[in-house]
Amino acid sequence: MENGLIVIFGFTMLYFAATGRLAAHIRLLVWQGLLLFLICCTEIHKLHPGSFIFLTLETLGVKAILIPWFLTRILKKHSMLRDEAPGKPHFFSLLIASLVLLAGILSQNWIQSYPIISPIHFGVSVSSIIICLWLITVKHNIVSSIIGFIAMENGIFLLSLSIAKEMPLLVNAGVLFEVFLDIFILGMFVNLIEKEFKNLDVSKLSELKDSGND
Amino acid sequence: MIDILLIYPLVAGLLIFIIKKRAFDVFAVNSYALLHIVISCILVFTHDTYLSSVRYFAIDNTNKIFLLVLSVVFLMAAVYNTGYIKHMKHEEKRIRFYMFLMLIFIFAMTGTTLSTNLGLAWVFVEATTLTTAYLIYFNRTRNSIEAAWKYVFICSVGIALAFVGIILLNISTDRVNSLNYAILACNSFQFDPFWMKAAFVFIVFGFGTKMGLAPVHFWLPDAHSESPSPISALLSATLLNSAFLVILRVLRILETSGHDSYGRLILLVMGFSSLLVTAVYVNKIKNYKRMLAYSSVENMGILAIGTALGPAAMYAVMLHVIGHSFAKASFFLTSGNILELYDSRRVSRVSGLNSIDRKTGWLWIFSYLAICAFPTSSLFISEYLIIKVMFAQHHYFMCALFVILLTVILHGFARVVFSMTFGKVAEDKEEQVRENRKKLSWCMYVPQIILLTMVFTLGVYVPPFLRF
């Protein structure tokens, strides 16, 4: 059951790579949040009740509801439908993402020699992080970059679940609070950039160069 | 006492929004600056180690210098800021938010410096990113939006990768379930070397992004050049140090486990990359604040190289931290005076600085001399000691490369600094520049004079508490 959920999480990354529709990206974030919640539920017997409540709040409350709601508002405000000009064709991104995910899943055999790590968690989470870094680089739309960053945070969350011990709650709470604030601030900058540059293409943000400006 | 350092800015920040008076905003920042330096001095001079009531914060031999540097630079930036905001034409609400975030920024850096836990240090470093985003965007120009966006996004991705490093470090620790530096260092001999090394790669790239080490430095020239000058000074002279301190602490864990040579190699490569990047860009620079930002990249590179050389160069590294912070703060604050006078960041639009405002002109020259390690600047001693260690360890090629790159960088800076200081002011601008001079009050000169005096004094006399 748990392994199945993790593999589905890995496949959501492929869909990320294959589509340019921003609304679909946000729906995927909702699915990822739900999947992460279900993965936490499968480990409920290992968790302290306080930690479980915290993780539920993090996965369901913030990752599956709050952040997607905030991003949907931004999309509606700017009437954005898709990432019009990604740096690489979607097929190419899908190919790369598939290869990375495959490598992540195959790495299980090697990871099995470390009893503290859950191999499937580790392989899928590391490949998700790498895929997101790739997508952040090739996607030109600012909202796509933010979505890629959030998906990377989801991958990091899965990675933290891969080890058979918990991070201190204080650190977890700090991380969650900052990620949320981070996305909030990035979202505000989307509005400012749209207002000032009349465009949300990352490549247009290139006025600051070593050639001098006032 | 550590508790006061961390609680005061939060209370003062809250009061700023309740009282809503410019005079109180200034008082809140300046009183925190004074309190910060007084408490730091008490902690540094009267205790070898001191733990806060919550045990997550402490002063020890590693962070005491960083805390002192933070206090001194903050006090100087606060004094300068008092004169700087006097002539700001922005609405009161905006200035209030600026002062509030300045307090929170210092709170976050103090938290990073004093934190005894790697996870908590991560949280505070991320907090510095969030608070400074607005400060960089403060002028609300196209350029400042671009700079702030790049800063927040690049640093967030970098810090997220640092968190991956923390998770990998947690894997390596096996049965030790703690992120406390001291506990990690004590038990590091039983950690898994593979995961520990993998963790260091992520941590050094993550916190290295914040520190401004090449090749992950891209946000730095934009952010430092676009923010208001007191903020540029704080970013360059204290924020980069905070990130460096975290790297230093993690390296110490590797050191106690006997796997530090790998970490040192990474730092060496990043250090030389930083020098190379600066050497390439500094000779075509047309914006003087960007030049100072590249100088920060260069100096962080020197710190990385010094750290890579091992314990033999540690004294030089610490001296360089102090010297660079003071000299760079002075340089950035003086650049604020120039920006007030000429209303431009372009090198080509600034000339005859010495004839318009002799004090700013000389401060500009002396800041340059301090940063380029002219005797008796403490940077001369630190760079000389680093070169000496390279010789002692028979790294002759590395030494030659280090000297050549520093010479190229020095030439690039000199070209800009001297062209701005001497010559004549364009006739059409002279009247306006002379008019702008009235904006500069005494508190926009005194902090630089104090900082430069300390830099040049440390080159001839190092007080006993700094002889680690």
Image: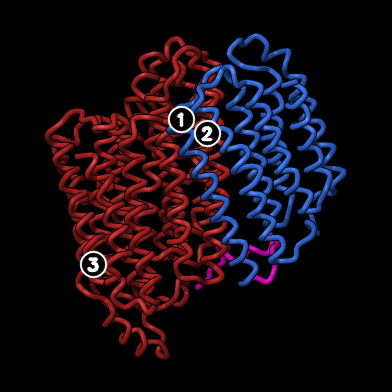
Chain colours: A blue, B red
Tell me the subunit letter for badge 2.
A
**Residue farthest along the right direction in this orientation:** A91
- Mark 1–mark 3 Cα distance, whole angstroms, equals 37 Å
Q: Is residue B199 left or right of residue A124?
A: left
Indicate the quadrant where residue A179 lies: top right
Q: Is residue B465 above or below residue B363?
A: above
- Mark 1–mark 2 Cα distance, whole angstroms, equals 8 Å
Tell me the subunit letter for badge 3.
B
Q: Is residue B203 above or below residue A30?
A: above
The residue to which callout 3 is attached is: B24
The residue to which callout 2 is attached is: A54
- How crowded is the residue under tag 2: few (<14 C-alpha within 10 Å), some, or many (20+)? some
- The mark closer to the camera, 1 or 3, is 1
- The mark closer to the camera, 3 or 2, is 2
- For this rendering, which residue is in front, B139 or B123? B123
Tell me the subunit letter for badge 1.
A
**Residue B274 in view here:** no
Q: Are marks 1 and 2 in contact (CB under 8 Å)?
A: yes
Magenta segment includes A204: yes
Name the residue: 36% across, 87% down: B432
- For this rendering, which residue is in front, B467 or A193? A193
The residue to which callout 1 is attached is: A169
Name the residue: 53% across, 50% down: A182
Q: Quadrant of the N terminus of chain B?
A: top left
Magenta segment includes B372: no
Q: Is residue B153 left or right of residue B318?
A: right
Range of magenta residues:
A196-214
